[in-house]
Image: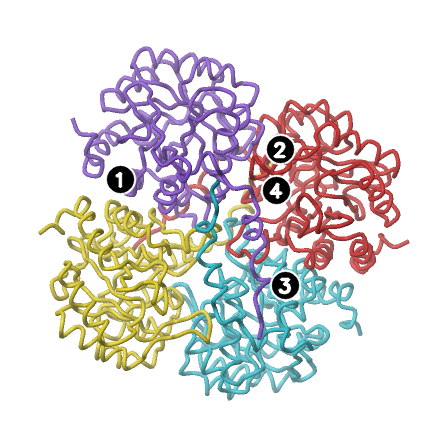
Chain colours: A red, B cyan, C yellow, D purple
Amino acid sequence: MTTLPDTLPSTIQGMKTLPPYKLVSRDNHPQNTVIKLGTAQIGKGTTIIAGPCAVENRETMLKLASSLSSLGVHILRGGAYKPRTSPYSFDGLGKEGLEILAEAKKYSGLPIITELTDIRHIDLLCAYADIIQVGSRNMQNFSLLKELGRVNHPVMLKRGLSATLEEWLLAAEYIMAEGNPNVILCERGIRSFDSYTRNTFDINAVPAIKNLSHLPLIADPSHGTGRRELVAPVAKAALAAGADGIMVEVHPQPAQALSDGQQSLTLDEMGQMMAQMKSVAPQLAG
Amino acid sequence: MTTLPDTLPSTIQGMKTLPPYKLVSRDNHPQNTVIKLGTAQIGKGTTIIAGPCAVENRETMLKLASSLSSLGVHILRGGAYKPRTSPYSFDGLGKEGLEILAEAKKYSGLPIITELTDIRHIDLLCAYADIIQVGSRNMQNFSLLKELGRVNHPVMLKRGLSATLEEWLLAAEYIMAEGNPNVILCERGIRSFDSYTRNTFDINAVPAIKNLSHLPLIADPSHGTGRRELVAPVAKAALAAGADGIMVEVHPQPAQALSDGQQSLTLDEMGQMMAQMKSVAPQLAG
Amino acid sequence: MTTLPDTLPSTIQGMKTLPPYKLVSRDNHPQNTVIKLGTAQIGKGTTIIAGPCAVENRETMLKLASSLSSLGVHILRGGAYKPRTSPYSFDGLGKEGLEILAEAKKYSGLPIITELTDIRHIDLLCAYADIIQVGSRNMQNFSLLKELGRVNHPVMLKRGLSATLEEWLLAAEYIMAEGNPNVILCERGIRSFDSYTRNTFDINAVPAIKNLSHLPLIADPSHGTGRRELVAPVAKAALAAGADGIMVEVHPQPAQALSDGQQSLTLDEMGQMMAQMKSVAPQLAG
Amino acid sequence: MTTLPDTLPSTIQGMKTLPPYKLVSRDNHPQNTVIKLGTAQIGKGTTIIAGPCAVENRETMLKLASSLSSLGVHILRGGAYKPRTSPYSFDGLGKEGLEILAEAKKYSGLPIITELTDIRHIDLLCAYADIIQVGSRNMQNFSLLKELGRVNHPVMLKRGLSATLEEWLLAAEYIMAEGNPNVILCERGIRSFDSYTRNTFDINAVPAIKNLSHLPLIADPSHGTGRRELVAPVAKAALAAGADGIMVEVHPQPAQALSDGQQSLTLDEMGQMMAQMKSVAPQLAG
């Protein structure tokens, strides 16, 4: 009779002997972590983060920030340093982008989230941003994670393109193990075989992560689908499954966006989505 | 300067020249297809299908059917012929299972859905079942699809484990092209790299399919997650994203189930989920 | 301290309790299975199978068969019944195709392999073909597998698009459990995220399957890559890794092929590949 | 009649408008890039790189280096800074590891390759290493890639876990665009659904990359399989498919290794593999 010891995959065998996650685990910290920022309480109720993929120019950004604030958005997103697949693509305005974000924050009253792509920019970003975003491509950039563990800013850690839940939680553990408890997880879709959508939003991950960890979980249906017409239904789905909020890309004229135009909502569409989300997140009302 | 003609993947090139789906397309049939069956109108409002993975014995099945009916379930599921990965696993009671289902239907008033695994059983199943289910493993069993196109019974076509949306819709087209317009699609999760869940429920597919096709779409969060504690949140998510209903596995004693125990709800859990779903599917109330 | 019982994936837990494969296992049958057919000994030395995707017309097929025989090919492939993603694509000549194959066999002396797509065609195919092929889409069509277990014809079982090694071996077990020991496995690429190639040929599967099972393993680099220019290097790789042979698509004029033209070799290319393979399969020489 | 404009996936549409790779392209640089280092000519003939996953202690490393040199290995690998999934795993000896590597180089005459995990260590690593390795997790750490474009050291760029060929080549383009032409690509397996092996070695990528680019390509069958018994067959396969060499993990006592023991060869196994590879890489002989 054949037994199956050899077919137990090595990755699983490895998992058993890994020192597992501790600080991120709900077993060791049953109550939700809540991060307060402006009018948002990330991890309690529903937090809405919105803004363009990249900061493109001052005037547009200021107007957009103001409009998003009127719509009830809590936090403004915008990339100043953009990781791009090609070295020849627009990769953000850099420090000038950060200054525009600071002005938009002043003008709209909205806290700012922006992405860190270079470990040497941490001090600079901490001077401008309220939340530091770690993108999917850097989810296992461990030296960057460790440095972010030594600041107090909240860190939003996006899931890697093909990261398991275990790997994602252990990446968050890297930040917490250095002393920063303010970690927010962001599900943004995983890579699958179907190219109809840019990524496959992993709805299973929403309740699974909320069971395994006390950290807040934000859903990104813009990257999770890559198609404008799918953003609102997937946003509602994520909230219905227990996500603590959503982050979406909004651009006044998506067709002119320098990046991610296909997945960016117009302001009108954002307004409609805010209204629709109230059915699954009643506290958004009023 | 390099151009990229060669890097345009052949599968995509192929898609362009494929005769695309016609009969399943919403472009050619803007209004939703609605299939009426007992108290259910599949494709209008929210349809709930529930029952055990496999029919195991008469008494349990009858009691369960009656309980599910009381909870507001519209259609009873139960496998008499089960496709199993191993030839040595329990593969259903066969005709005896069908007879138990018929009795359960009589006793509870619920219409019956059961799976077809062998083209030679079509007449038999049509004599007992109200809906014929085609499982994931048979999604591209084209001779079986064609035969189902020649009957009038509604057919529920589950998405293959790694089928693209295009392939899935073209499988439905096989049935419709032979003359049977009563096709229901069922998203039940795709295979991904993460083994924390049995499959990855593809929430993007829900609004995408509803855009592309007029056919009803049912979500199966039991197979889509493979873990009992994730079934209710993913069911709610699917309805929030626009699914026309859900199909779930329920077993009076999941730990004793002959198959799929880990993903089966107890009756209590089913009752709680029915209550929770009202927030995303108000017409379920009352 | 967190422990990890819950993160041990359910699929793996399931594997442990599955009745594992027995008859396909090398543990229970240490020596290689060898299937003799014409000049081929499948499972000993290197077997070359070649021919068009589909039988398209008599004259072309006869000429091609004769040319392939001259090149040292052992077995002729050709589809009479073709599973096609769309119901509107050319799906083979059916019985007429089988008759052409029979004539090509007579003319060239080469045994024939052709695909079974409908359980009701088994007797017909057994009357014409020397090896019955089960395609990827039918790898878990268990009723078909069982019927093939009741004939004596060798069966070539292609791996499903996203089948694990375990699932593939258990599908072979279905055939053997019914009494037919003449099973040949065929690795033809799995579905992955990269669309540059049609499939991802799983080279790891070659030595893994040869370790786990005594059955012969044939590699299909045509479907495994989907691109003509990659067929020869991947064929050589498969043989270097221990495959018992290869199956390739050859067409006199690939640009005119009714299916799979992009991955079909010309006769010249086939001849060149035969020469190149001798470096990794010396017994092909002379 | 339905047309399919919308189903052309956005990622593909994006590819068309991306400034494609230029400097890495074989179209613009038909002849192979060859990097000379010690007795190796990477990109011409077959280069063998071997050594432990991590440098663990001085004595073992020196002995191993000497033994590997005797076996005909050209370059010594060893990690001083190790990226680890968990923050609680052994992550290398750091600078002490580099010093041991320097001593091993002196003692054995073999050039050294070691991994860079932190952009701030570039100068340090350049002082010790002959080739700088960029690991899979950092394949799209663009700030690190740009800095490596400003040094002259050869850089070995491992493919990301789920990177497409396009993304991988564009990552190499980042390094070349900054002025460093000495880039070596390393295929080390991609993530798939099957957990029998740690990764799925993408054999298709070997000839595909050699067609698309003039850069040398090294295969890593240790990470590509994760199982010791599969390393030699996959190494031979990669060479048969056209790889310019292989990199393998070797440990004097794999069962005692602090990392990657399951995929490390013993010295005896390494010797046997060197002998076997001569059939596919005749220039290794003598």
Amino acid under label 4?
A: Arg
- State the residue position of label 1: D236
- Circle 2: is it few (<14), some (14-19), or many (20+) Cα within 10 Å? many
Q: Which residue is outermost to the front? A: B1
Where is mark 3, residue-wise? B208
Residue extending furthest right? A286
The x and y percentages for residue A274 are 81, 55
Task: Please check whether the numbered discs 1 and 4 fall on a single chain.
Answer: no
Whether residue B192 is visible here, answered yes or no, is yes
Q: Which amino acid does label 1 sit on?
A: Lys
Q: Name the residue located 45 percent from the left edge and 62 percent from the top edge.
A: B14
Is D251 drawn above or below residue A114 in the view shown? Answer: above
Real-space Cα separation, disc 4 to disc 3, in angstroms = 23 Å
Chain bearing tag 4 is A
- The residue most toward the left is C286
Q: Do the residues labelled 1 and 4 touch (CB within 8 Å)?
A: no
Q: Distance between the residues labelled 3 and 1?
A: 44 Å
